Amino acid sequence: MDIPSFLNKTNPYFQKLKSSDKAKFHDRVEKFIDRKSITGRQNFLVTQEVRVTLAAAAVQLTLGLDTWDLDYFSQILIYPSEYQNPQTRQMHKGETNMGGFMCFSWIDFLRGNKTPDDKINLGLHEFGHALRFSGMQGHEPDYFFDNYFKRWLACASREYTKMRKGYASILRKYGAVNINEFFSVVVETFFENPQEFKTNLPELYHHTSILLNQTTAIDGSIVLNCRESLMKLNISKDIKENRTLLKYVLPNSGAIYAALLFVIFGCFSLLGDGYKHPPAYILFILAGLCWLHLERKYTRVYFKGKNLMIEKGFFLTKNPHSKTLPISQLISFYANYYELDNTPKIEGCNIVFYYEGDFYEENLYFELTQPHFDQLCDVLIANYVHVHIVR
Ligand SMILES: [Zn+2]
């Protein structure tokens, strides 16, 4: 069977690819068929056409990703039509089972492909689940997809919450069932009606394009490897330069007193015994160590332009550890919450950010009172940074 010419005839997505991307698609389809056990149930005959058609849906979804073969799911069962799940006794058209297998009703799979712009596509829907669950199960998931998913979620939660409340959406109602269904419904719409998606939910479309590392251009062609350029365009909102509100509190003022005491005793012992007296120098060294301990913990966080500025140290170690992070590259922000004498406080956080092809994590020590923290969160949330408060 000549796979490229079969796909050229039957697969509208394949038709919209550049020729080099068609080669990549073809290669992955062959590998997918090799790596999966695809078997028929209830006398369904699995032909090469069936295998290619099935694999094409998985490859379409993951063509922009580096790790793409959904390795948690090694077995795919195909039924001729709707089938009954032996455990739940319910009828299914498709299923992505956490046990590591997938099932499809072939008649419904083909129905999904038949109308390529009705936003219903069983294959893309189930492989959307498989992509998400492969990440959650931790069997070699796609590194970028897994990390960026948090930021995608921060953006998606608005539309999802609206749908949960019963508001109309261009996304299929079924997406309101839970966040996994929402993701799969987004996937179906992303491929089957990109123009409507882009016009009505531009931000969600934008973040989905980054997440999957592919997008549909105005002329309808598929553009792969768009994530770097799109990330730079991540929408920046409501960022006013704010140097004063996010005040730090020195978390360990004991170190200042200790350092001062060591300096004072050092000076007195120099005065009393002269410059050859070694204990004075030991006291000065201790003073220095206390001071460094304080500086290491000292962090100041504020917004400047479209950046989150993180300054560490304030005297001896001031500049080397400072960072300028474009908010467009921030992924998530986990803050530690606690209460002291009934006063809520935020002490320290862990941030994840993306920089030139890699994700970085950083732990910051600082102390914020609730109103200052709320202000910080407002800006982060407006920019779809995933904010999580650890209690
Ligand atoms: Zn589903």
Image (cartoon, rainbow, N blue to C red):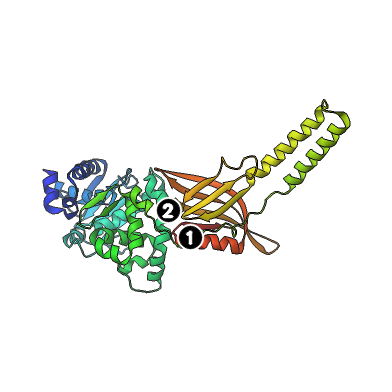
Residue on which the image places disc 2: 328
Residue on which the image places disc 1: 239
User: Splitting the image into 4 quarters, where does residue 171 fall?
Assistant: bottom left
Rate crowding at label 1 as few (under 14), some (14 to 19) or many (20 or more) other CA atoms within 10 Å: some
Q: Nearer the viewer, residue 32 or 28?
A: 28
Q: Quadrant of the C terminus?
A: bottom right
How far across and how far down the image is residue 140, in percent?
38, 42
Rate crowding at label 2 as few (under 14), some (14 to 19) or many (20 or more) other CA atoms within 10 Å: many
User: Splitting the image into 4 quarters, where does residue 86 fall?
Assistant: bottom left
Q: Residue at x 20, y 63 (%)?
A: 117
Sequence-wise, which precedes: disc 1 or disc 2?
1
Give the secondary structure at mark 1: loop
The three-letter amino acid code for the residue at tag 2 is Ser
As drawn, is 360 to the left or to the right of 98? right
> Nearer the viewer's eye, disc 1 or disc 2?
1
Q: Residue at x 11, y 43 (%)?
A: 2
The three-letter amino acid code for the residue at tag 1 is Ile
Give the secondary structure at mark 2: helix
As drawn, is 5 to the left or to the right of 150? left
- Residue 353 numbered tag: none
How far across and how far down the image is residue 314, in percent?
63, 45
